[in-house]
Image: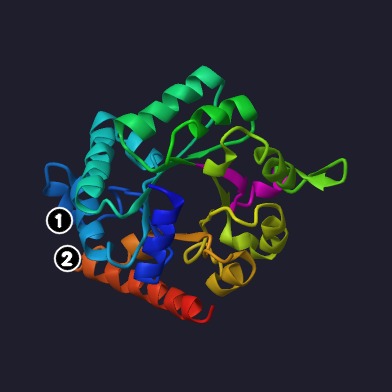
Amino acid sequence: MTTKQLISEIKKKKSFLCIGLDVDLNKIPSHLLAEEDPIFTFNKTIIDATHHLTVAYKPNTAFYEAYGIKGWKALEKTIQYLNKNYPEIFTIADAKRGDIGNTSSMYAKAFFEDLGFDSVTVAPYMGKDSIEPFLEFEDKHTILLALTSNEGAFDFQTKKIEGKEVYKTVLETSKSWKNSKNLMYVVGATKAEYFKEIRNIVPDSFILVPGVGAQGGNLQEVCKYGMNENVGLLINSSRGIIYASNGNDFAEKAAQEAKKLQQQMEVILDGL
């Protein structure tokens, strides 16, 4: 999917919502456990109930890898279902990969070619040669961890080296990499006060923003400082939507929670 297509979908749906498909068998409705593939059944039902409210889905691969081959098969079926039935949806493999060049090439092939995701999250710690293999793929996007929403982000990301925070160095350096136009960035919603300076460094890039909802991030604050002329934001919510209910009405409740966020986004977009 091209960036232009993503922007068009945001305008069409008046939404820049991303729904995280982080499936925990201990949290999904118990009646689904009798299904042959409860993970896929849960995902399919959530997707069918919310696709008109969101522009992206983000399965975190750890929640699938934890269940071995059955989990990976469920992930494969989920992305196939999305690509076949809702090709307008932007898909994110939240895998946080990043390794030496030849290994990164294989990771990129796995997520972009075999599975068919539009994007994948990657860690920048190993530098240029660990990221550029992902950037080689046309109309695919590499989402670089820049400033995350977890408590441990302060261990390294905000530390200053020669007077500059590490996350700023990551942002600035990444712009020099080959095919950097294919980069997006992860910035946590709980770091809303940082968005203004981040936008000074990457004014045109899309930013994936976890942390709204269950983690306490504020949508209005993020948009105030992080939105650009093309919106430039994908706001992720996972637990607050997909686990809104663990009963037979789980899909309906998920849609209701997604609708609440979408309506807030519509107000913000109408105010631009």
* Mark 2 lies on residue: 248
Secondary structure category for the residue under label 2: loop
Number of numbered discs on residues: 2
From this viewpoint, is residue 126 visible?
no
Residue at x 52%, y 63% (from the top left corner): 230
- Left or right, residue 75 beside residue 227: left
Residue 240 place in picture, x, y as percent: 39, 64
The answer to whether any part of residue 106 appears in the image is yes
Q: Is residue 213 above or below residue 269?
A: above
Secondary-structure class at tag 1: helix
**Residue 257 circle label:** none
Which residue is at 39% across, 62% downward?
8
State the CA–CA distance, disc 1 to disc 2: 8 Å
Image position, residue 34 (x, y; %):
12, 48
For the residue carrying disc 2, how many other residues have a C-alpha within 10 Å: few (<14), some (14-19), or many (20+)? few
**Callouts 1 and 2 close, C-beta under 8 Å:** yes
Q: Amino acid at mark 2?
A: Asn
Q: Is residue 59 above or below residue 265?
A: above
Q: Residue at x 24, y 39 (%)?
A: 74
Q: Nearer the viewer, residue 198 or 35?
A: 198
The residue at which mark 1 appears reads as 31
Quadrant of the rendered image containing residue 131: top right
Q: Nearer the viewer, residue 100 or 66?
A: 100
Magenta range is 142-155
Q: Please give left or right for residue 181 compared with residue 157 in the image.
A: left
Q: Is residue 133 above or below residue 172?
A: above
**Mark with earlier residue (1, 2):** 1
Q: Amino acid at mark 1?
A: His
Considering every residue shown, the one lying at the far top of the view is: 102
Q: How is the image coloured?
A: rainbow
- x and y, in percent, of residue 11 in the image: 40, 68
